[in-house]
Image (cartoon, grey):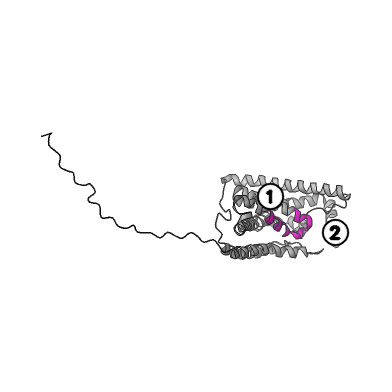
Amino acid sequence: MSHGGTFPPLPPLLGTPPPSEPPVLVESDPAPRPLARWRLIVALGILALYVIVPAVIGAGRTVGDASVLPSSVAAVFVLCAWELTLFALAFSVAGVLARFRTDDLRLRWRGGWWVLPRSIGWSLALRLGVGVILAGCLVIYRFVSGASLEDLAGFRPEVEAMVDIDALRNPVYMVLMLTVVSFVLAGLREELWRAGMIALLGAAFPRVFGGDRGAWFAIIPVALLFGLGHTAQGPVGVIATTMLGIGLGAIMVFHRSIWDAVLAHGFFNAATFAILPWLSDQFPDILALLEHSSRAGLAV
């Protein structure tokens, strides 16, 4: 074999490249157009009216009216079905107008199994916080006004306007209160409403309520509206539920998930229902005095 010769040229491995052709432009999906503001305002109005209407009805309650929650199991089931259907319709219309997405409503489950014990802790913290603030307001009011303890007996949420305490002695009724009413009618429904309101405020008024920081500001007006929706519980009940709404909104925004707030809300309500019959048995005179004072205040 000769080593001094030249090697023949190798054939191209990939063959002769084809003549260049102009690139083909592939049309990409257009970016989603921002929603018209009127759609967001209308959706916001629908969800706001869902709370304003019961607020007006509750403000018109008089002494002797039946509690908001019926005293029979069958009637509570009917009420739950009616309220959930009405909410589903209102929320669906608002959702279509605003084109809600999963992340808009913070529907992702974050935290694994820790969500359950964490939400129990949050419910205890909410009860302690609301109680301390109400007690502080009571002390300040008594110091400023000079009112006696008997005069301040009615300074409390009027829970008897919401539920018949005697009906809670029925085990089936109690189970219904601790489950469906606490976690579905109250927890899930009301926290979906809160998530929708926060999302709509952020979309309609992005300079004030937009983004992660704006969501913290949106908690306040939503909580005020939430509190007004509980006028049936009297002025103190409105104050207490407003503070509760601030806490639940903060939990939702902090965890970027609705589920901590749903469960904390449910545990908060369930604990209230569970303890009312016990309070009635242990302190019947005190509860009778409180009821008498609140009725006298309403009569005035």
Question: In x, y percent, where is residue 3?
Answer: 13, 33
Crowding around mark 1 (Cα neighbors within 10 Å: few <14, some 14 to 19, many 20+) is: many
- 257 or 217: which is nearer to us? 217
Residue 246 part of the magenta-drawn span: no
Q: Indicate the secondary structure of the residue bearing disc 1.
A: helix
SS label for mark 2 = helix
Where is residue 100 shown, x and y percent of the image?
Answer: 56, 59
Q: Nearer the viewer, mark 2 or mark 1?
A: 1
- Give the label on residue 101, or none: none
**Residue 14 drawn above or below residue 93:** above
Residue 245, position in %: x, y? Answer: 69, 53
Indicate yes or no whether the magenta region holds residue 226: yes
Residue that label 1 marks: 247
Q: Of all residues shown, which one is farthest toward the left?
A: 1
In the rendered image, the quadrant that contains the C terminus is bottom right
Q: Residue at x 83, y 61 (%)?
A: 298
Q: How much space separates mark 2 and mark 1, taking CA atoms? A: 29 Å
Q: What amino acid type should be assigned to the residue bearing mark 2?
A: Gly
Q: Is residue 249 left or right of residue 18?
A: right
Residue tagged 2 = 297
Among the 4 quarters of the image, the one containing residue 20: bottom left
Stretch of the chain drawn in magenta? 220-239
Q: Is residue 98 left or right of residue 297?
A: left
Main secondary structure found in the magenta portion: helix
Q: Residue at x 71, y 64 (%)?
A: 54
Q: Nearer the viewer, residue 66 or 257?
A: 257
Q: Quadrant of the N terminus?
A: top left
Q: For mark 2, does the 10 Å Cα neighbourhood hold few (<14), some (14 to 19), or many (20 or more) residues?
A: few
In the rendered image of this protein, does residue 300 appear above or below residue 282? Answer: below
